[in-house]
Image: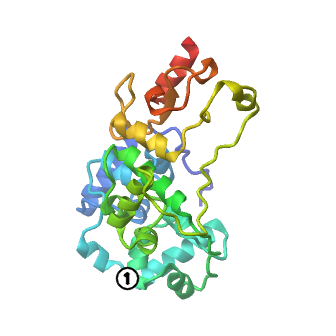
Amino acid sequence: MEFKLNEYHRNISKEDLINDLKKVSTALCKSYISRSEYESNGKYSATPYLRCFGSWINALSAADLQTQRTKNDYLRISDKSLIEDIKRVAILLDKESVSTKDYSEYGSYKVQTVLSRFESWSNALSLSGLMPTVYKEITDIELFEEIERLWIIKGAQPTTTDIKNGLSKYSLNTFSRRFGGWRNALKAFLDYINEDYVFAEKEKTNEQPLVSKESVSLKSRHRTPRDPNLKLRFQVLNRDSFKCCMCGRSPATTHGLSLHIDHIKPWAKGGETTIDNLQTLCSDCNLGKSDIE
């Protein structure tokens, strides 16, 4: 028996990752390859793909493969396979319970597949012999912030397909239970942006920004807080078509691009946080603008 270290793949190129993923697709004669299928047949683990592309779905898309299973693929997944995979994630993380967020990041299947098969995450954990997760109430604002994040990434209205493909950190059931369906969730989000949304009595918006020493010293010079809230931020992004006003790039076409809300007349020079004095800039252009100023 030969003892040696496994090959180190941290600096593997994006091209090599894509080529090996295509190679596995051809060998298995399948246009959709799951993480577990790849790790059983590919040259690398899923980790460098997640590090390079951000998600397994993005990796499949980069390799021009299907990003979701067909109906027959779902039917071929047995209850036992789903349960064993949940157990595997628990062992991997050394936890007595696995949250939907944990499974979304490390599982071989989609959270939605598990939910549709076992009706609830609690049932899936019980059948896997794991402890139930500690319930954390998700506020309306947190759900609205996630809808905004998805809208920015796509540059367009997010769909149920986006949620099912794992783009959201919350499941479709989470939105549906709160708002009565995905379309109702989108309507509630837009009502909130347009200031027509009515919160439940116990809901806390947390919309007041923290006051910094700088903002206190400039209090006499400003009538608005320095940081725009969720409503104003989304209004500016939507007005600017979710694109940088300087270079025209957007997260929808440039992977990993981050958009910032920038004061046209700088806050330090008396500029107010109003929609007419705000613009959308990508992180690169915003940094360059700061350097010039």
x 47%, y 23%: residue? 285
Rendering coords of residue 148 (x, y %): 44, 50
140 versus 241 height, above or below: below
x 47%, y 26%: residue? 277
**Colour mapping used in the image:** rainbow
122 versus 139 height, above or below: below
Rendering coords of residue 197 (x, y %): 45, 59
Judge by depth and name the residue closer to the eye, 112 or 62.
Answer: 112
Number of callouts in the render?
1
Rendering coords of residue 212 (x, y %): 73, 35
The residue singled out by tag 1 in the image is 78
Outermost residue to the top: 292
Would residue 217 be seen by someone viewing this image from the given angle? yes
Determine whether, in the image, residue 130 is placed left or right of residue 214.
left
Mark 1 burial class by Cα count in 10 Å: few <14, some 14-19, many 20+? few
x 66%, y 72%: residue? 95
The kind of secondary structure element at disc 1 is loop
Quadrant placement of the C terminus: top right
x 35%, y 78%: residue? 77
Instruction: Place residue 252 in its image quadrant.
Output: top left
288 versus 5 height, above or below: above
Would residue 46 be seen by someone viewing this image from the given angle? no
Indicate the amino acid at tag 1: Ser
Quadrant placement of the N terminus: bottom right
Instruction: Place residue 210 in its image quadrant.
Output: top right
Judge by depth and name the residue closer to the eye, 62 or 120.
Answer: 120
Judge by depth and name the residue closer to the eye, 62 or 167.
Answer: 167
Rendering coords of residue 10 (x, y %): 54, 42
